[in-house]
Image (tube, grey):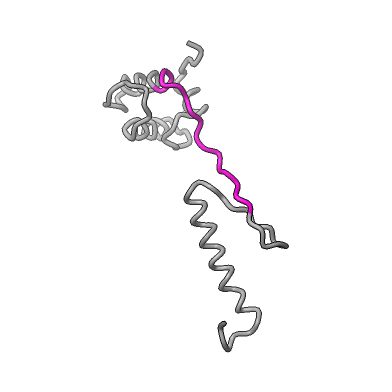
Amino acid sequence: MIKGLPRERKGMRSYGILLLGILFLSSLGSVPFVEARTSQVTVVKVKKAPRYSRATIAKAQALLKAQGYYTGPINGIMTPATRAALKSYQRRHYLTVTGYLNKETIRSMKLDLRS
């Protein structure tokens, strides 16, 4: 119990702890949603990057390698080198820089996902 503070200020400490908890959970990929009227906390999952097949990733790696963005092996695995190449490609083509394959990047690369 904190002595000497008005009653309204004593509750501020718990809000600070709650905010730190929200920041921590958001860094783990979940965002808590706190209702103002109750003390219940609901955790909402953040939408993650879409997953593509190894064949699609290999096509992207081949295109990135042909354009000089990627120097690693064409193996269809999303490695840190692949993500770095995607970021460079996205930055150069004025796309949203995520480091992952997304619809916008695939459209820009003109990748055919059907075959």
Looking at the figure, which quarter contains the N terminus? Answer: bottom right
Direction from residue 3 to residue 64 in the image, left or right: left
Report the residue that reaches farthest toward the bottom.
Answer: 4
Question: Residue drawn 59% across and 85% down?
Answer: 5
Report the residue that reaches farthest toward the right.
Answer: 37
- Residue interval drawn in magenta: 42-57
Residue 114's spot in the image, x, y percent? Answer: 51, 12
Residue 22 to residue 3: above or below: above
Residue 112's spot in the image, x, y percent? Answer: 48, 14
Direction from residue 18 to residue 66 in the image, left or right: left
Question: Residue drawn 60% across and 50% down?
Answer: 43
Q: Quadrant of residue 56?
A: top left
Residue 38's spot in the image, x, y percent? Answer: 71, 62
Residue 29's spot in the image, x, y percent? Answer: 50, 46
Q: Is residue 96 magenta?
A: no
Q: Quadrant of residue 47?
A: top right
Residue 14 to residue 6: above or below: above
Callout count: 0
Q: Is residue 49 magenta?
A: yes
Question: Residue drawn 63% across and 53% down?
Answer: 33
Residue 63 to residue 46: above or below: above
